[in-house]
């Protein structure tokens, strides 16, 4: 599509932005170079996360706000939705023209802390420090980090350094094993499943199901061989969902399914069941809840190749791993661990009956893998399996 066609398609407002971008593109480098001459503010920190205002970046931000010694900038999609704050400025992730405001702050901030990516054109200068917190301990093989060249990234423990460096294709000495801020949040919000804000009955056992995405909203990230009608492994068809719901109802157990933010939308997510609740990021935002404030309020976890399984080890609660597509996943994307089953201390589920058996165990208070979980937790976390990650991060990075 040429420039004229773009203008015709996008109307007056869109046309203005397109023309502005075209005209400004040649002179952007000049402004970027000038901004790099600005002095760096040692107390200015930029945060970014996807989705906005959450995860490791949000948990660290909340911790640092209590010290009252830093100033903050958050990069978000819609700054106007966050109101005004005395110590925090919200700027747009996207923009037209020169994007002067964004580059003004990026050129002045001493610390840039992010979970996914920052401005793609940004190149640090002087004594700036880029900390890629990541958004989970790597299990799956990487598809390219999609991040700016960071100085450091975080790990949940010494034995997670190598998998993380393999996933990000970076030197091991850039992976710092001091824990994730979001796990401080997790441990501070531990409770029974009946306390979960999305649970419908306080007397039921409540399981949290957190599958990794299969068919993604970003085609380049999709695991095409793993896509199903429901977007879920094992429970592939709507009839399977109905069968699962019937079993849950008969056993007074509830499952909260947290849909991955990269998972493509499925009609099933909008349907209502008596004992299955689908929760999206919009649902969390609507209630003002962070994901890691919700995860700990559950009686057990069902997952697969999601990094949440490592975080959940800190809660010392049962975990089931749905592995019905493990072989195809291995052939398609692969894993960063030599033997992925060694770091999956829980029920390994390959069919629906095994899933139903696990649900029955939780209902009856059976925990068959407590010792195995403890061993894997100690192996992965070592001395940092506590709620002190934010304090360690501040001591290590924020001089």
Image (spheres, rainbow, N blue to C red):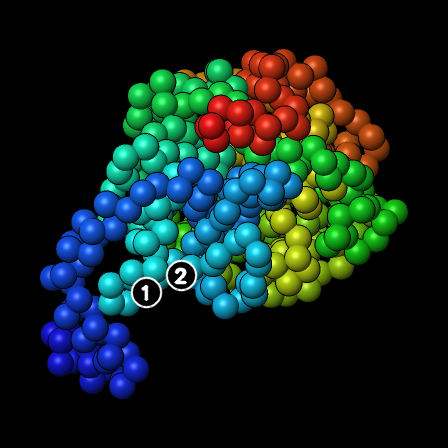
Res 378 → quadrant: top right
Residue 365 spot, x, y in % from top left: 82, 30
Within 10 angstroms of label 2, few (less than 14), some, or many (20 or more) residues?
some
- Left or right placement of residue 209 versus residue 32 in this view: right
In the picture of the structure, the residue carrying the numbered disc 1 is: 95
* 266, 355: nearer the viewer: 266
Instruction: Please tell me whether residue 359 is drawn above or below residue 276 in the rendered image.
Output: above
Residue 298 spot, x, y in % from top left: 73, 40
Residue 388 spot, x, y in % from top left: 63, 26
- Left or right placement of residue 319 versus residue 130 in this view: right
| Residue shown at 36% from the left, 23% from the top | 174
Within 10 angstroms of label 1, few (less than 14), some, or many (20 or more) residues?
some
Residue 301 spot, x, y in % from top left: 66, 37
Instruction: Please tell me whether residue 199 is drawn above or below residue 389 in the rendered image.
Output: below
Q: Is residue 28 visible?
A: yes
Residue 92 shows which numbered tag? 2
| Residue shown at 69% from the left, 20% from the top | 369
- In the structure shown, which secondary structural element does the residue marked by tag 1 occupy? loop
| Residue shown at 40% from the left, 61% from the top | 92
* 311, 90: nearer the viewer: 90
Instruction: Please tell me whether residue 373 is drawn above or below residue 46 in the rendered image.
Output: above
Q: Is residue 156 visible?
A: no
- Left or right placement of residue 383 versus residue 332 in this view: right
């Amino acid at each position: 599509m040429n420039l004229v066609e773009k203008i015709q398609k996008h109307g007056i407002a869109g046309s203005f932005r397109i023309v502005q971008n075209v005209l400004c593109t040649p002179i952007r480098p000049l402004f970027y170079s000038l901004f790099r001459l600005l002095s760096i503010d040692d107390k200015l920190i930029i945060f970014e996360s996807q989705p906005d205002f959450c995860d490791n970046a949000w948990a660290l931000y909340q911790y640092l706000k209590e010290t009252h010694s830093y100033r903050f900038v958050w990069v978000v999609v819609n700054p106007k939705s966050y109101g005004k704050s005395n110590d925090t400025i919200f700027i747009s992730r996207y923009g037209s023209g020169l994007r002067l405001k964004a580059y003004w702050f990026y050129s002045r901030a001493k610390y840039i802390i992010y979970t996914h990516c920052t401005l793609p054109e940004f190149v640090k200068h002087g004594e700036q420090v880029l900390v890629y917190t990541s958004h989970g301990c790597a299990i799956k093989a990487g598809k390219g980090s999609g991040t700016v060249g960071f100085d450091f990234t975080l790990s949940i423990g010494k034995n997670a350094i190598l998998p993380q460096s393999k996933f990000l294709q970076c030197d091991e000495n850039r992976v710092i094993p001091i824990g994730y801020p979001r796990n401080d949040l997790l441990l501070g919000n531990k409770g029974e499943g009946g306390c979960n804000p999305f649970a419908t009955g306080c007397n039921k056992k409540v399981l949290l199901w957190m599958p990794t995405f299969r068919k993604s909203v970003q085609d380049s990230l999709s695991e095409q061989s793993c896509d199903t009608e429901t977007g879920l492994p094992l429970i592939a068809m709507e009839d399977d969902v109905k069968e699962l719901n019937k079993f849950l109802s008969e056993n007074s157990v509830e499952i909260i399914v947290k849909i991955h933010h990269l998972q493509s939308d499925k009609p099933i997510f909008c349907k209502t069941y008596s004992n299955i609740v689908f929760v999206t990021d919009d649902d969390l935002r609507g209630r003002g809840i962070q994901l890691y404030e919700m995860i700990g309020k559950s009686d057990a976890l069902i997952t697969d190749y999601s990094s949440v399984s490592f975080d959940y080890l800190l809660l010392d609660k049962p975990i089931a791993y749905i592995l019905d597509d493990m072989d195809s996943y291995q052939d398609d994307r692969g894993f960063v661990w030599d033997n992925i089953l060694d770091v999956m201390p829980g029920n390994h589920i390959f069919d629906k009956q095994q899933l139903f058996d696990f649900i029955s165990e939780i209902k009856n208070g059976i925990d068959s893998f407590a010792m195995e979980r403890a061993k894997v937790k100690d192996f992965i976390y070592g001395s940092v399996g506590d709620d002190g990650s934010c304090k360690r991060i501040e001591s290590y990075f924020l001089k």
